[in-house]
Amino acid sequence: MSEKREHWSGNWGFLMALAGSAIGLGNIWKFPYVTGKYGGGAFVLVYLCCIMVIGLPILIGELTIGRATGQNPIGAFAALCPKRSKLADFLGGLVLLSGIALITFSQIGYGVLVMILGAVILYGGWKAIGLISGVITPFLILGYYGVVGGWTLIYAVKAVTGNLAFRTAAEAQAAFLPIQEAAPGTWWYVIGGQLAFMTLCGIILWFGVKKGIERCSKVLMPSLFVLLIVLILRSISLPGASAGLKFFLSPDFSKLSAEAVLVALGQAFYTLSLGMGITIVYGSYVKKGTNLPKSVLQLIGLDTMVAMMAGLAIFPAVFAMGFEPAAGEGLVFQILPTAFNMIPGGLGAVWSTVFFIAVAIAALTSGISLMEVIVSVLIDYFGMKRSAAVLLSWISVSVLGVLCSISMSSWENIPWMEKALTSLFGAPPESLFLTLDNLTANWFLPAAGMAISIFLGWVWGVRNAMNEIRQGAGRELDTNFFILLSGMRGESGYGDSYKHIFTPASIWGFFIRFITPISVMFVFLNMTGAIKFN
Ligand code: PHE
């Protein structure tokens, strides 16, 4: 290691940095919509259960792996499992065999990819999980996240300069399509936005953990909060806002299908930035005395609150202005600017500006957390200086991002890649952007989630992990759950009874061994189409 590892300055800095990563586009463009679609308040309840079943156990686990080893994801797994692991060999073998099976079904491209994956796991053991989830995944995600990040910057600038004054949804669509599709005439524009986004991430990371990530999160996260409150006040005071509130929140248990539960599980996982090495790396900057479970509970509270706030800011305005709700880029880049622009009082540009600055903040702080994972591997593993590591990450991720932007227009712009993909997969996927999104969200993230909970529960072991978590966490972890909830802790005769029955520690162990991996497996099977619930 060439430089001494930095640490967060304290609980607040750690919490803000973690919130910066967790609170992203998922909170703003996905959560509000799926909530409205799948039963409002009823969905929120299910979502909270999923956060508890999947999100919380894995988040504590990843942070613990990071803090216990003080290392990047590859080094962390290597340190915790130095010997060969039979379980890893078994899993690697299984993956290798599935690759062979795919090839016999003449899925050559996928088969070869899966076989390579199996071979890497067989060769590297658990370290391979660190490599895949902690280097490859963040790299691929950042490749397309930067493109969207670029859109948010472009729109923030457009909003400030009064260029979002759309009068109809069609007008908004006409303005967005060339950007989304990176039409030849707007290339420089889209690529410029994407490069600006990556450059901002790089500049912040250049300053390091405390002076870069932590300092900017401490300013940006509270600002995001304030901006959302301003928007909520405007949005819910519009005439006709109640229809939006009704769509977003009124509980409708009939819409709670099995599919809704799976969507909630997937969202819980994504929104906490799990399975991409981020929380392992952020955990490695945590001081030993920090109370991890407490920070995690605070983070979950903040993340959920911002997701709810986004819904309160968005839907009342959308409905009051007579639009239909939607998700994703259609909502953020088309419906919302139009709706905000139509708010009476002539302040349309102001509302759009507030909104797009908030979205850009959310995207930027998530982007830096992704890039930091790659930077940390380069620093630890190759002994690079932070400045060199940032530069190299910036260049490589930007190259991928530029390819991504170009591919949105048409594969004909990068014929060699189209040719390569056609020979491997039969036909090239729609775009590199969508391929990376699909590959990471549907395959890599859930697979990493399963692998990490199995590693924690069965390889490193719950006892070892818990001993690490206990540092700084106080005795609550080992107090009977009901005694804790009933407020009887400390009562003579009950209070601190140190019994390992139904304590937060034993519940965590049980979840991470059984409930969490099985739940993620269902998400995985559903997303990959192996099973379908309806
Ligand atoms: N947690 C982020 C969100 O909710 C997702 C994310 C974080 C994606 C970091 C990529 C990188 O939007």
Image (cartoon, grey):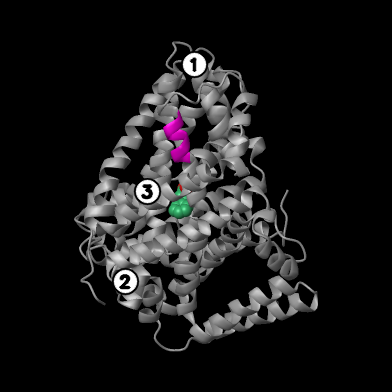
Q: Is residue 181 visible?
A: no
Q: Is residue 413 left or right of residue 51?
A: right
Disc 2 target residue: 379
Q: Nearer the viewer, residue 207 or 19?
A: 207
Q: Is residue 267 magenta?
A: no
Q: Are marks 2 and 3 in contact (CB under 8 Å)?
A: no
Task: From the image, give the main secondary structure of the stretch colored magenta.
Answer: helix
Residue lying at 52% horizontally and 45% vertically, measured from the top left: 188
Query: What amino acid is at disc 3?
Result: Thr
Q: Secondary structure at mark 3?
A: helix
- The disc, 2 or 3, on the residue closer to the chain's N-terminal end is 3
- The disc, 1 or 2, on the residue closer to the chain's N-terminal end is 1
Query: What amino acid is at disc 2?
Result: Ile
Query: What amino acid is at disc 1?
Result: Ile
Q: Nearer the viewer, residue 262 or 9?
A: 9
Q: Is mark 1 within 8 Å of ligand 1?
A: no
Q: CA distance from mark 2 to mark 3?
A: 21 Å
Q: Nearer the viewer, residue 179 or 498?
A: 179
Disc 3 target residue: 365
Disc 1 target residue: 343
**Residue 511 picture location, percent across and down:** 47, 63
Residue lying at 27% horizontally and 70% vertically, measured from the top left: 385
Q: Report the magenta residues as a range.
A: 152-158
Observer-side mark, 2 or 3, equals 2
